Each structure stands twice: as structure tokens, then as C-alpha cells.
Image: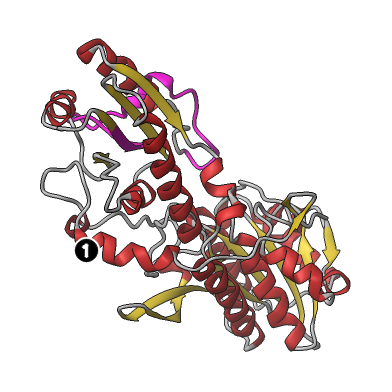
């Protein structure tokens, strides 16, 4: 049977997820295969909603635009497939759609929860004698996937965070009055992205002065003590959205409104909670800044390393699918100071697992990162990208 690919994107988008999509498309085109894009992730498969990608991306200019466009070109979703024993009908629907469209290769680009979909689909195909390859391509700015040195999307988000923290520090430093600025950065249970704020430091800037991560619970009293011991006039504090107190409770618990479909608490507002708490304690000028979705959609200042690697890992995923491999997800393995190879992991070893910051990357004082983390992270933000612009702003490609 002639190879025919389908590809989809899932979960929160990144500034590099479309570079991975480009890699998958390139891998399919090099094999002379037709490739369809499922609109809005696995939801698009269920609804038999596909677009033909060959006609669009045989054009070199469109490929260049895709690589540099943030967000998810195909759209995304957050759908958790049931266990087969609880809902085999949905699996029958999915594989009927694959059969109807003659699809025998499926690459799913996503994070922890998306790899759960890859795991379930590949197992269903295997257990039911269905000849289709299901392969995962990783992405997440959280950098918390197992089986990989880092994840596509993290480097660009880390670069944006470090740059934003540096610029906020410049802004706050113009005033003589004592001040505290708290910058809230994404990271529910893993502090990789918040830790990257340390890359803002330079010979003429020591900000951020304090960094708090979800891996180390921190008491109110410890935060106050750290601030009292900080000699800076304008203190910059970087915090993960998911930091917890000494009792393991989220600081933002009072502003948590709901849970998502995967059962994750919808976190927001810890910087505001700390602003109120510390304002009452110190009486300084206070400001809280939540980077929110800006840190994942900032395509105007991406990392060349990140975009190139994201494209490469997508292409490798397509190659693995073309070779008939299934139930695997790609990953990076660092082999020297900064040389990475692409490896294949069994998706069951990645799905629904969370890789947190190791102790050796967090300072003993629990309010900073170590030199080992800086050495790990710095190569991931390197390399400038020539942004394609139109009328003075970045030019993007859309469906």
C-alpha cells in the first residue's frame, strides 16, 4: 500500500510547534507520500476533518512561513481518549476514518497528555491487527517530558522569558524608591521555564534576584527572609505559577477556579497573591507581572537552535513512521557540551509522566538555580532567526 500520512497537533501551542509540523511534512514529501493535516488534533480525526498539505507546502515560501509562525497551524485540542475498555466505539470511529482515507501513518505532535493518545492508538492498532504506524513528536514549553534532554518549544520560550525578565528589570530600576516586582512564569509542577529566567543575568544586571520553583516548597516566612537579605533596591522575583507553601498547598489556591479535562488545576494568580502578601509586609512599591500566553506565542524572538531542532525531530518522526515503527516518541540525547542526537523512546515510558528539575539544578537555598542549570540551558536559546515581516510586523501563515 502506498504511504499516506496524517499529522495533527495537540495541547498548548508553542513558537516552534509549526517547525515540527514542517519537519513531518518534509519527511512525508521526501517519501513521495500524500500527507493530510487533521484540524484541531485528534478531534479532527474523529470528525474526518482533514486538509491536504501537499499542495500548500510544496511551495518553499509557505514552508519558510510555517517554520516561523507561532501557534498551531492545524489547530489544537485537549481531548483525553478513554481507556479502550471504557469506550471502544471512539477507537472504532478513529480507525474507520483512517481506513476511509487510506491513512497508514499517523504522527501526533504534543506533550505529556498527547503521548497518552499515541500510546492508546498504537496499542489499539497492535491488539486489533491494524497496519498503521502511530508515532509521537514531542513539544512543550514546560520541558517536562520524560525520555528527552529537552523539548521542542522550550528553548524559544526560555529565550523569551529571559529577555522579558531583563527588560522588566531595566524598567523597574529607573526609580529610586524601593520596589518588588514579581514575575509569574508558566510551570505547574516543573520549574524549567522559570529557572530559565536566570539567563537574564549579565555583567550589569543581577536580576532576577530570587527564583522560586514548584520542586521546592517555600514558606511565607522564608520568602520574607530572602527579601530582607537581598541588598538590591529594586528586587525582581521570578516565580512558577505552581509554587507551593511548606504544606504543599499552591499559593494561588485562592484563585484556582477549575480543573481541565486531564484533572490539572487551572493555575493563575500566584504573583498577585504574593504581591498582596509582600506589600502588606514591606510597604514597598509592588508590581506583579504575569507573562501568560506571551511566553509560548512570542514568535518574534525565537531560538534558532530550537526551531532547527524542532524541524529535525518532526522529520525524524515521519521517517520512523515510514519505516513502519509504531508506539514510539522522539527525544533528544545530549552527547557532549552541546551536540544532540535524536532517539526513539517507547511511548509507554513517556506518556503521563512528568520530568521535574533535578536537585543539582536548584540551589541549596531553594531560591535560585545552580551553574549546572545555566550550562544545561544556555545552548538551547542560542541563534538568531530572521523574522519574515510584512508592513513592519511578523508575517504568519494561516489555513
Q: Nearer the viewer, residue 262 or 31?
A: 31
Count of marks overlaid on the render: 1
Q: Horizontal placement of 296 versus 324: left or right?
A: left
176 up-or-down from 390: above or below: above
- Nearer the observer, 180 or 154: 180
Expressed as whole percent of the image width and height from the top left, the position of residue 63 reads 75, 71
Find residue 60 and report its horizontal and vertical position in percent.
80, 76
Sort mark 1 into few (<14), some (14-19) or many (20+) by Cα contacts within 10 Å. few
Question: How far across and how far down the image is residue 354, in percent?
Answer: 37, 55
Q: Is residue 339 above or below residue 90?
A: below
Q: Is residue 127 magenta?
A: no
Q: Quadrant of residue 398?
A: bottom right
Magenta-span inclusion, residue 259: yes
Residue toward you, 40 or 307 = 307
Q: Quadrant of the C terminus?
A: bottom right
Which secondary structure is most common in the magenta stretch? Answer: loop
- Any part of residue 12 in sight: no
Q: Position of residue 343 (x, y in %)?
A: 44, 80
Residue drawn at (11%, 48%) of the image: 364
Q: Secondary structure at mark 1?
A: helix
Q: Residue at x 55, y 75 (%)?
A: 313
Q: Which residue is mark 1?
A: 372
Can you see residue 111? yes
Quadrant placement of the N terminus: bottom right
Instruction: Using residue 14 as the reference point, say whether residue 166 is left or right of it.
Output: left
> Residue 164 appears in which quarter of the rendering?
top left
Q: Which residues are magenta?
A: 236-263
Amino acid at each position: 500500500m502506498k504511504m499516506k500520512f496524517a499529522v495533527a497537533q495537540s495541547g498548548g501551542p508553542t513558537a516552534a510547534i509549526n517547525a515540527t509540523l514542517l519537519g513531518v511534512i518534509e519527511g512525508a514529501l521526501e517519501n513521495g507520500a500524500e500527507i493530510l493535516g487533521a484540524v484541531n488534533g485528534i478531534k479532527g480525526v474523529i470528525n474526518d476533518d482533514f486538509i491536504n498539505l501537499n499542495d500548500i507546502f510544496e511551495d518553499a515560501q509557505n514552508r519558510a512561513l510555517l517554520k516561523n509562525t507561532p501557534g498551531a497551524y492545524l489547530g489544537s485540542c485537549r481531548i483525553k481518549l478513554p481507556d479502550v475498555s471504557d469506550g471502544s466505539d471512539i477507537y472504532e470511529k478513529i480507525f474507520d476514518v483512517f481506513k476511509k482515507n487510506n491513512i497508514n501513518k499517523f504522527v501526533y505532535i504534543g506533550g505529556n497528555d498527547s503521548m497518552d493518545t499515541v500510546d492508546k492508538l498504537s496499542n489499539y492498532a497492535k491488539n486489533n491487527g491494524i497496519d498503521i504506524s502511530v508515532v509521537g513528536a514531542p513539544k512543550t514549553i514546560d520541558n517536562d517530558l520524560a525520555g528527552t534532554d529537552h523539548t521542542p518549544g522550550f528553548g524559544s520560550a526560555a529565550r523569551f522569558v529571559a529577555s522579558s525578565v531583563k527588560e522588566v528589570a531595566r524598567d523597574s530600576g529607573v526609580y529610586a524608591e524601593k520596589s518588588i516586582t514579581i514575575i509569574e512564569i508558566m510551570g505547574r509542577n516543573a520549574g524549567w521555564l522559570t529557572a530559565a529566567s536566570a539567563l537574564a543575568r549579565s555583567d550589569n544586571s543581577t536580576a532576577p534576584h530570587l527564583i522560586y520553583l514548584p520542586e521546592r516548597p517555600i514558606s511565607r516566612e522564608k520568602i520574607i527572609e530572602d527579601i530582607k537579605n537581598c541588598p538590591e533596591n529594586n528586587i525582581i522575583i521570578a516565580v512558577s505559577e505552581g509554587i507551593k507553601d511548606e504544606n504543599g498547598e499552591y499559593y494561588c489556591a485562592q484563585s484556582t477556579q477549575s480543573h481541565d479535562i486531564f484533572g490539572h488545576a487551572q493555575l493563575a494568580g500566584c504573583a498577585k497573591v504574593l504581591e498582596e502578601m509582600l506589600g502588606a509586609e514591606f510597604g514597598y512599591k509592588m508590581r506583579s507581572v504575569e507573562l501568560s500566553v506571551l511566553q509560548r506565542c512570542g514568535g518574534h524572538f525565537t531560538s534558532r537552535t530550537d526551531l532547527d531542532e524542532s524541524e529535525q525531530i518532526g522529520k525524524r518522526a515521519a521517517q520512523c513512521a515510514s519505516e513502519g515503527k509504531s508506539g514510539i516518541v522522539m527525544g533528544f540525547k545530549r552527547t557532549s557540551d552541546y551536540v544532540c542526537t535524536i532517539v526513539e523512546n517507547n511511548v509507554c515510558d513517556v506518556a503521563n509522566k512528568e520530568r521535574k528539575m533535578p536537585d543539582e539544578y536548584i540551589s541549596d537555598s531553594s531560591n535560585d538555580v545552580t551553574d549546572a542549570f545555566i550550562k544545561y540551558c544556555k545552548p538551547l536559546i542560542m541563534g538568531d532567526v530572521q523574522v519574515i515581516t510584512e508592513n513592519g510586523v511578523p508575517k504568519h501563515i494561516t489555513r
